[in-house]
Amino acid sequence: MVDDFAPNGLLAKVIKDFTPRDAQQKMAAEVRRAIEHNLPLVVEAGTGTGKTFAYLVPALRCGKKVIISTGSKNLQDQLYSKDLPIIKKALEFSGKIALLKGRSNYLCLERLAHNNGAGGELSKTMQVDLTRVKQWSIKTQDGDISRCSVVTENSPIWPILTSTNDSCLGSECPQFDDCYVVKARRRALNADIVVVNHHLFLADIVVKDTGFGELIPQADVLIFDEAHQFPDLACQYFGQQLDSRQLFDLAKEISLCYHTEFRDTAQLQKCADKLLKCTQDLRIAIGNISLKGNLRDLLHNSLVRAEIDYLKSALVFSQEVLQLNIGRSSTLDNCFERVNQYQTLLSRLLNLTVTGFSYWYECIGNHFSLAITPLSITDKFTELMAERKGAWIFTSATLSVNNNLDYFTKRLGLTQAASLILESPFDYANQTIFCVPRYIPSPNDKNIASKLVDILLPLIEANRGRCFFLCTSYMIMNELARLFKEKTLLPVLVQGETSKTELLEQFVDKGNALLVATSSFWEGIDMRGDVLSCVIIDKLPFTSPDEPLMKARIEDCLLQGGEPFNDIQIPEAVITLKQGVGRLIRHHQDRGAIIICDNRLVMRPYGAVFMNSLPPSPRTRSVDKVTDFLLTKK
């Protein structure tokens, strides 16, 4: 195994400038051992370790069925299109490799056919997109909508032309034999290596798909990259959720059936209209601002409770109408099943007496979600691993807290797993400088944005931009962006002004930009070279104790005699901070500064936990020293 990673090994022959790394070889050896003996393994591999190749080589060599799950669809595409072809070539691997995404990523031929007769129901823009999708559908081999270049990825036509677990007709679908999801699953069944993402993996466990079972095949080896995301995602998927998009989609489906096939049944349109109106009225009753809160508190609002009763009535009416039309079409039968499912789900959400769960709601724009989330998934996940025997391997650059993996392993019940922490091979002592500036205001200071701009703008301008300013809230992000735009001639890019991909392209193209962003830019960004040489973070990323899931976990921790701040809040913040700091150094030739604008790092005892968890950069309190470092050539 180590020979593959040697200076004259197989990887060196196909990868330009390949450099052997001890940490990479150690990880590959541990992964191989876990695969051979069907063991659980947890590996934190610091940035630059080369963890992807360290698990791909033994995975391709093992001769077993392997599932690789990544943190996002973008990483999934990179793994399938870039990394795996390199290893496949190096090892002369002759097995089959498949990419499998969730249903909503594939064109649904039945919904395309169904919507052909609904032209009058669509806006002119959507009608144009519908025509373009129809033309593309003739050419596409796999139906992957990300490869449809003639329609934008965020076009409102896609939710109409793709299916969900709820709306899929399964084996009852007239287009079943030609279905792109079925074809993708067949390829996955026949493949040796299957690349999925965490969302699909977890959804597939929780939802047994109607008609043709699970999408993801059984495997002997399961590898989870970007595993730090997995516990929180698993909590969400092992919970239950009803959202307005599900209800809107159901109402539109019933209405479409009336307009295209069943004009003789006006009651279909009536129940669709009632369901749509009750869903909209409930959203209005919840409030007109984006927020997330405790569902128990929300249900004390008499107006909200009344609108939920109206929604329950609309579901009962829809159930009665659809029941009279059972057997007339597979689509109507599916709608009937969904109505029953949503009635059951709503009743569960309204039963607030069950302990061990967080009850919460969220509003984003015109949509809402009502949800319950288990506070612990340890038992559930342990049971899952026992049921699906094999090697379970979890890896990320950010799993440990204070050089300890207990926080991660306890959440998934992996306390008996082998574990390994591999430090980054980067030379942080010479490549970086770390600063908590003097004279910065308290994180709760009302004028913190203005003071941070005054302190840091000279440094940012001296560095000619090339800076990420990562924020812990949209409010501080927007205020900082406004002030920077007023006070500097440098290009100021702001999250939300355009897509994430477009923002990053602009950042690279301009070469002297300041990007002000929040949550989605803290991880998954790989900016190498001089284009990014400074990362500033506004404060330690503690989750608000009033956030519903965090509040419930805190209460549960207290009941068990724990210390919520030490046991939950600090570890969560440490892992998030490590992700943000990790945006800076992505290559052994990168060089730059990390600035964290929070005195608690040096003033509070728990600051040591954060500092011990971060890379070993030289430290200073002087912004001037940071400027000198950035202006000093390599």
Image (cartoon, rainbow, N blue to C red):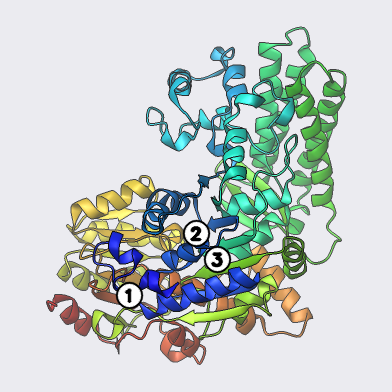
Whether residue 400 is visible: yes
Q: Is residue 308 above or below residue 388?
A: above
Residue 249 versus residue 15: which sits nearer the camera? Answer: 15
Q: CA distance from mark 3 to mark 2?
A: 20 Å
In the image, taking residue 551 as reference, residue 180 lies left or right, namely left
Q: Which residue is mark 1?
A: 20
Q: Earlier in the sequence, mark 1 or mark 3?
A: 1
Q: Which residue is mark 3?
A: 227
Q: CA distance from mark 1 to mark 3?
A: 25 Å
The answer to whether mark 2 and mark 1 are in CB contact below 8 A is no
Indicate which disc residue 60 carries.
2
Q: Earlier in the sequence, mark 3 or mark 2?
A: 2
Q: Identify residue type, mark 2.
A: Leu
Q: Nearer the viewer, mark 1 or mark 3?
A: 1
- Can you tell which quarter of the image residue 547 is in? bottom right
The residue at the point 50 percent across, 62 percent down is 61
What element does badge 3 sit on?
A: helix
Q: Identify residue type, mark 3.
A: Ala
In the image, taking residue 21 as reference, residue 285 lies left or right, namely right
Residue 177 image offset from top left, x and y in percent: 64, 25
